[in-house]
Image: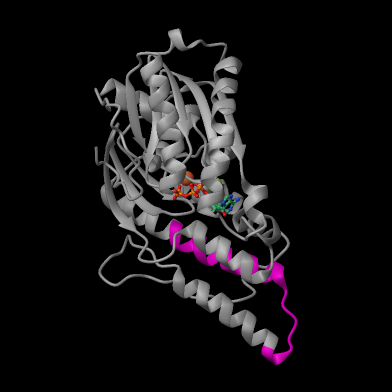
Amino acid sequence: VLILAVESSCDETAAAVVRNGREVLSNIISSQIELHKLYGGVVPEIASRKHIEKINQVIEEALSQAGVGLEELDAVGVTYGPGLVGALLVGVSAAKAISYAGRLPLVGVHHIEGHISANYIEHPDLEPPFACLVVSGGHTHLVVVKDYGKYEIIGRTRDDAAGEAFDKVARAIGLGYPGGPKIDKLSKQGNPDAIRFPKAHVADAPYDFSFSGLKSAVLNYLNGCRMKGEQVVEANVAASFQKAVIDVLVEHSMMAVEEFGFDKFAIAGGVASNSSLRQAMEKACRERHIGFYHPSPIFCTDNAAMIGAAAYYEYMAGTRHGLDLNAVPNLKLGER
Ligand code: ATP
Ligand code: MG
Ligand code: FE
């Protein structure tokens, strides 16, 4: 089964051709990061306009690099939520046009289902059930993947997403946007035990997360130093903040894995490309004799190959959307 997948939920215009959900024939990503950097974050209106400029070119490139014509495709998959409504609409409209012109089934995909499914691409042996920690720019979910397309969210953030916390703290230190990769890099030169930042737990919800208190603690620490005229060692702040986030992510994930008795654990989303998080999870899983799965960094941040992987399993399960498919900015995981 050959699927053309399209993704435009945030600031990446992306298209990919994927065979049987796991074999990536092409994976084209046009990132708008350089553009949004000027504003310190994603500007929705600019994102939509840029998607419109790029989408046809990106889709054509995905098809030509895969050496596949429209007539050889079996379906078109597209992210229809969650995300920025104007951004989503560009990909959804393009996918609908191709579906209509090529008489191809249309399969709408949930963006987070895509992030989770990125794990299938490089791990032919990975099959549900397993537990997955989704850590991205807008989500922090501890998910039980019961079967393909069947999810139960057992833990979630009460406030900021993990990636959002990375981006905000990076901005406070003066590292620029997007902050995740910059904190990752700077942390390698810092001492993670230099500053003791709080690790928040939510009462009566052991799998939930909260990162806004940690973010405030970092801001207070920076302000305190400035007021006292003390020099801030940015690398130590970055490393100590990163450690506080990772400790909680590992702790809650392993608690869930043990409680539910899973022998497989995966991570997904942009923050899953964080090198220290990967190391910490790898170690925690090894100690418990649990299989640890993670996508390569290029499949962690937004891409269309992961949407192609998710679309395949939705397609096989019979999911079909009509040409009235709309963008759903607050789409819930597991909703159709
Ligand atoms: P969502 O998927 O929730 O809709 P999104 O699509 O904007 O949000 P992703 O593309 O999955 O998010 O991930 C982007 C986030 O990942 C940003 O917050 C970015 O800072 C973070 N990120 C990327 N690389 C790293 C890294 N190496 N370490 C930590 N965070 C990272
Ligand atoms: Mg992005
Ligand atoms: Fe994403």
Residue 268, given in percent of the width and then of the height, sits at: 46, 44
In the rendered image, is residue 291 in sight? Answer: no
Which residue is at the front of the view, 309 or 14? 14
Q: Which residues are magenta?
A: 227-249
Residue 266, given in percent of the width and then of the height, sits at: 43, 42
Q: Quadrant of the N terminus?
A: top left
Residue 32, given in percent of the width and then of the height, sits at: 61, 44
Which residue ends up furthest to the top in the rendered image?
A: 71
**Magenta residue check for 240:** yes
Which residue is at the front of the view, 58 or 298? 58
Horizontal arrangement in the rendering, residue 120 relative to residue 177 (left or right): left
Q: How is the image coloured?
A: one colour
Does residue 231 lie above or below 308 as drawn?
below
Horizontal arrangement in the rendering, residue 22 relative to residue 273 (left or right): left
Which residue ends up furthest to the bottom in the rendered image?
A: 228
Does residue 328 lie above or below 105 as drawn?
below
Does residue 261 lie above or below 2 as drawn?
below
Q: Residue at x 29, y 47 (%)?
A: 332
Q: Residue at x 31, y 46 (%)?
A: 331
**Magenta residue check for 228:** yes
Q: Residue at x 49, y 29 (%)?
A: 305
Q: Quadrant of the C terminus?
A: top left
**Quarter of the rendering containing residue 37:** bottom right
The kind of secondary structure the magenta stretch mainly shows is: helix
In the rendered image, is residue 133 in sight? Answer: yes
The number of numbered badges drawn on the structure is 0
Does residue 253 lie above or below 26 as drawn?
below
Q: Residue at x 30, y 44 (%)?
A: 333
